[in-house]
Image (cartoon, helix red, strand yellow):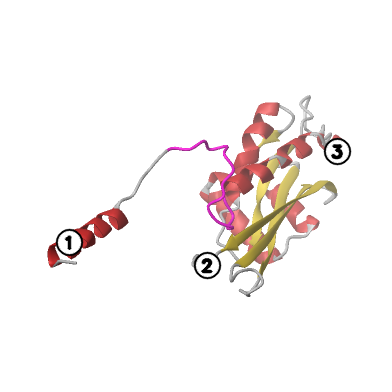
Amino acid sequence: MKWTQLAAAAALLGALTSCSSLRYTDPDQVETVNIQFGSTDIQSFGQLAGSLLSSPNLKYVNVEDKGEDKRPVAVFGGIANETREHINTNQIFREMKPDIVNSGEMRLLAGAEDNGQSILDERVRFESESGRVAPGQAAAFGRQLGADVVIYGALSDIYKEGSRSIENVFSKRKDVYYQLNLSAVNVDTAEVLWTETAEINKQQTVSLFGRG
């Protein structure tokens, strides 16, 4: 091959490798880019709002000086990230928030997901002093903010990765299991009024020449 042909081939290869593309996709489309926590997982966990709103224990809270509106006043106390990834867990509650507010079933105070500095300071102290939060500690946090109920939880994961072998044509499999547990606690009694767990299991197969 002549040098001119080699140069043309190298230039073509460089052009092909430097090209990129951009397109819009449906935000509700299932995300399958990789095994890491993503938008589809947030949307899936956001469906816990339906379970929260259907709880008979959260239809009303009748306490002194509450007036005629007996709907529970709730505040979001945060979701502890116990996974191996850096995840903004506030996004999960932001996904739930429109359903909660627009249902009219409960009144929602500005909480950790709204990034108010005073609320954020309370949340930091709440989490740092309590570690894995107990119902009584959650209740104390909510009482400081004038809420009837605190909604809080934890997101955890289990990650497994297989090794490459001749049997699987030198590909390898990755599995990750996410578990989200949310609870709602009465600030006066520390009673758990509602609790629910949601799970997601994802699997990725990486070929011999694939990254990861």
The crowding category of the residue bearing disc 1, from other C-alpha atoms within 10 Å (few below 14, some 14 to 19, many at least 20), is: few
The crowding category of the residue bearing disc 2, from other C-alpha atoms within 10 Å (few below 14, some 14 to 19, many at least 20), is: few
Separation (CA) of disc 1 from disc 2: 35 Å
Separation (CA) of disc 2 from disc 3: 46 Å
Q: Secondary structure at mark 1?
A: helix
Please provide percent x and percent y for residue 194. 82, 45
Q: Secondary structure at mark 2?
A: loop
Please provide percent x and percent y for residue 120. 56, 53
Query: Residue type at mark 2?
Result: Gly
Q: Nearer the viewer, mark 1 or mark 2?
A: 1
Separation (CA) of disc 1 from disc 3: 77 Å
Query: Residue type at mark 3?
Result: Asn
Counting residues from the start of the chain, the first of labels 1 and 2 encountered is 1
Q: Residue at x 79, y 29 (%)?
A: 70
Q: Residue at x 29, y 54 (%)?
A: 16
Indicate which disc residue 212 carries: 2
Residue 54, compared with residue 133, is above or below; it is above
Q: Extreme front residue here?
A: 1
Please provide percent x and percent y for residue 192. 84, 49
- Badge 1 is on which residue? 5
Q: Quadrant of residue 164?
A: bottom right
- Badge 3 is on which residue? 57
Q: Nearer the viewer, residue 23 or 199?
A: 23
Query: Residue type at mark 1?
Result: Gln
The crowding category of the residue bearing disc 3, from other C-alpha atoms within 10 Å (few below 14, some 14 to 19, many at least 20), is: some
How many circles with numbers are drawn on the protein?
3
Query: Which residues fall within the magenta stretch?
Result: 24-38
Is residue 31 in the magenta section?
A: yes
Q: Nearer the viewer, mark 1 or mark 3?
A: 1
Q: Tell me, yes or no, if residue 183 can be seen here.
A: yes
Is residue 193 in the magenta section?
A: no
